C-alpha cells in the first residue's frame, strides 16, 4: 500500500520510472532468495515489507507508464498488463506446490496437523499436482527431511523473476538512458506508431506542463499538497474519491473471495471434501485470467464505462444467485467461475475510464492503485472477522453487501462525471467568449483610431480650403473698395 502511494513520485522522467522498476524488480528476486535463510521473525517481516514496497511501486509505475504513453488507447494495454498479473497468480502456486510440506516444523498434535492441512489446501490453487491431504501425521525425522526442500520454491521464484530487471535494463539501454552505455540504435518508442500518434496529438511539452500544474500523476501526498488543486472543481476531487472507493470494494471482494472460498466450501451446508474445495481458488484465479484475456479485444470495441457497468451488474447478480443456491456445490463452482470473470477487468477499465474523464491529469492512477491495495488488505480482515464470529454463511452476504456498495459508488461516479463535463463545457465556452472579446477589442481600437485619423484629416482639408479661399476674398474686397465712387 505504501509502495503504491509513493510510486507516482518516480514518473517525473522516463529514466526515473525505469530505474525504479529495475531496482524494485531486482529487490524482489533478492528478497525471495534470502527469505529461506531468515532465522528470526522480525528479519522475515522486514524482508516481506521491503518486497511488498517494491511490488507496490511496480504496480503504480507500470499502470502510469501505459496510461501516459497510450492515453485513450491505454485500456487495451492495461487489460493485457492485468492479464499477466492474473496469470502469475495462477501459475506461481504450481511452482511452489511440489515443495510444500504437508506438515509443519517439529512435533504436532492432531489439531495442529488439521490446521496445516486447512491452510495448505487454501494455498494450493492448482488441481494439477495430486496430494493426499488427509494422510496421517508424518514422523518427525521424515517431516524435517520433507520440509527442508521448501527453500527451493523461493529460489526458483527468485530465478524466474530475474529476467524482469534484465529486461528493464535492456529497455533503458535501447531508450539511450544509460550514461555509461550510449546506444546507437533508434529508441523503441520512436518506432511505436501508436505511441507517437498519441504523443503528437497530446502536444507533448504543453501536456507535461499542464499535468505538472495540476499535480499530474504524482504520489498521493504530493497531490494533496498541490496548491493548484484549490482552484479545481469539487467534481475533479470526487471523481478521484469515488473511483478509488469502487476499486476499494471490488478488489476487496477479489481478495476476500480468493482467501475464504475454501473456508466457506468445507463448512456446512455444502461441506465439500478438502481436496475438492481446494480447486475453487484455482477456478477463481483461472476465471480472472481468462476474463482479462477476453477483455483485451472487448476494450477495443466497447468503451470502458460500458464494460464496467456490465461487470458490476454481473458480479452482483452472481453473488445473489450464490446466496439463493447456497446449498448447491455445483452452482458454487459455476458461480466462482462467473464471479472471477465479472471481477477480472474492473480495475483496468476503471483506471482507463477515470483517466479519460480527467483528461490524464491529476493523480487518478496513484489513487486507484492505492485504494485497490487498501481494499484487498482491509476487506480480508473484515470478512474474516465476520466469518469467525457469525459463521461461514456470512461470507456470501458480505460479498453481496460490498458489491452493492461498490455499484452505488459507481453510480455516484457517473453523476460527477456529468457534472465535470458540464463544468468543462462552461469553462470552454467562457474561454471562447473571452477570446472573442480579446479579438474584438483590438479591432474596435483600430477602428476608433482610423475614425479619429479620418476626422482629423477632414478638418485639416477644411482649414486648407479656407486658407486657399481667403486671399481671393481679400482681393475681391479691396477691388470693390477701389471701384466704388
Image: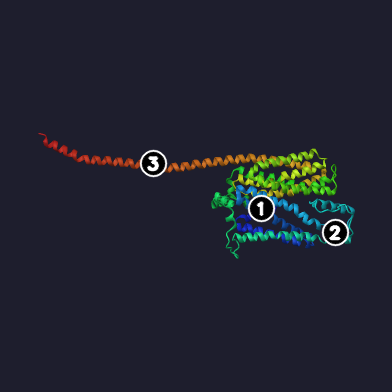
CA separation in Å, label 2 and label 1: 38 Å
Residue at horizontal 73%, vertical 45%?
Answer: 341
Coordinates of residue 345 in the picture (x, y in percent): 69, 46
> Which residue in the protein does label 1 denote?
60
Q: Is residue 238 visible?
A: no
| Quadrant (top left/top right/bottom left/bottom right) for the C terminus | top left
Q: Earlier in the sequence, mark 3 or mark 2?
A: 2
Secondary structure of the residue carrying tag 3 is helix
Q: In which quadrant of the rendered view does residue 402 lie? A: top right
In the rendered structure, the answer to whether residue 288 lies left or right of residue 68 reads right
Q: Are marks 2 and 1 in contact (CB under 8 Å)?
A: no
Secondary structure of the residue carrying tag 2 is loop
> Which residue in the protein does label 2 denote?
105
CA separation in Å, label 1 and label 3: 57 Å
Query: On residue 447, which mark appears?
Result: 3
In the rendered structure, the answer to whether residue 141 lies left or right of residue 187 reads right
Q: Nearer the viewer, residue 480 or 454?
A: 454
Residue at horizontal 16%, vertical 39%?
Answer: 475
Q: Nearer the viewer, residue 59 or 125?
A: 125
Query: On residue 42, which mark appears?
Result: none
Amino acid at each position: 500500500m505504501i509502495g503504491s502511494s509513493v510510486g507516482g513520485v518516480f514518473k517525473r522522467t522516463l529514466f526515473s520510472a525505469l530505474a525504479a522498476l529495475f531496482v524494485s524488480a531486482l529487490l524482489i528476486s533478492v528478497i525471495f532468495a534470502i527469505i529461506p535463510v531468515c532465522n528470526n521473525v522480525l528479519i522475515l517481516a522486514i524482508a516481506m515489507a521491503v518486497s511488498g514496497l517494491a511490488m507496490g511501486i511496480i504496480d503504480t509505475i507500470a499502470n502510469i507508464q501505459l496510461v501516459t504513453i497510450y492515453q485513450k488507447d491505454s485500456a487495451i494495454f492495461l487489460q493485457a498488463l492485468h492479464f499477466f498479473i492474473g496469470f502469475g497468480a495462477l501459475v506461481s502456486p504450481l511452482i511452489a506446490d511440489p515443495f510444500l510440506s504437508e506438515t509443519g516444523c517439529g512435533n504436532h498434535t492432531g489439531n495442529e496437523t488439521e490446521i496445516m492441512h486447512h491452510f495448505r489446501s487454501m494455498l494450493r490453487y492448482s488441481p494439477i499436482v495430486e496430494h493426499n491431504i488427509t494422510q496421517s501425521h508424518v514422523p518427525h525425522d521424515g517431516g524435517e527431511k520433507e520440509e527442508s526442500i521448501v527453500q527451493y520454491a523461493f529460489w526458483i521464484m527468485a530465478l524466474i523473476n530475474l529476467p524482469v530487471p534484465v529486461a528493464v535494463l535492456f529497455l533503458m539501454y535501447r531508450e539511450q538512458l544509460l550514461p555509461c552505455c550510449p546506444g546507437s540504435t533508434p529508441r523503441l518508442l520512436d518506432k511505436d506508431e501508436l505511441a507517437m500518434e498519441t504523443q503528437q496529438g497530446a502536444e507533448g511539452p504543453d501536456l507535461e506542463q499542464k499535468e505538472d500544474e495540476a499535480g499530474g500523476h504524482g504520489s498521493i501526498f504530493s497531490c494533496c499538497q498541490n496548491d493548484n488543486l484549490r482552484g479545481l472543481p469539487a467534481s475533479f476531487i470526487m471523481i478521484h474519491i469515488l473511483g478509488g472507493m469502487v476499486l476499494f470494494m471490488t478488489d476487496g471482494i477479489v481478495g476476500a473471495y480468493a482467501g475464504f472460498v475454501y473456508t466457506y466450501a468445507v463448512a456446512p451446508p455444502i461441506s465439500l471434501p478438502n481436496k475438492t474445495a481446494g480447486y475453487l481458488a484455482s477456478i477463481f484465479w483461472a476465471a480472472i485470467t481468462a476474463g482479462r484475456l477476453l477483455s483485451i479485444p472487448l476494450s477495443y470495441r466497447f468503451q470502458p464505462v460500458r464494460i464496467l457497468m456490465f461487470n458490476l451488474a454481473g458480479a452482483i447478480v452472481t453473488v445473489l444467485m450464490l446466496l439463493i443456491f447456497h446449498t448447491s456445490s455445483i452452482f458454487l463452482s459455476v458461480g466462482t467461475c462467473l464471479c472471477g470473470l465479472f471481477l477480472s477487468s474492473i480495475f483496468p477499465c476503471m483506471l482507463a475510464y477515470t483517466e479519460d474523464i480527467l483528461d490524464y491529469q491529476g493523480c487518478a492512477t496513484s489513487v486507484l492503485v492505492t485504494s485497490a491495495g487498501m481494499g484487498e488488505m482491509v476487506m480480508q480482515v473484515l470478512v474474516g472477522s465476520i466469518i469467525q464470529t457469525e459463521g461461514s454463511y456470512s461470507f456470501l452476504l458480505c460479498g453481496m453487501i460490498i458489491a452493492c456498495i461498490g455499484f452505488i459508488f459507481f453510480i455516484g461516479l457517473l453523476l460527477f462525471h456529468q457534472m465535470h463535463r458540464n463544468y468543462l463545457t462552461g469553462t470552454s465556452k467562457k474561454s471562447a467568449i473571452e477570446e472573442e472579446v480579446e479579438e474584438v477589442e483590438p479591432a474596435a481600437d483600430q477602428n476608433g483610431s482610423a475614425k479619429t485619423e479620418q476626422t482629423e484629416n477632414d478638418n485639416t482639408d477644411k482649414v486648407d480650403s479656407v486658407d486657399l479661399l481667403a486671399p481671393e476674398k481679400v482681393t475681391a474686397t479691396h477691388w470693390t473698395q477701389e471701384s466704388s465712387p
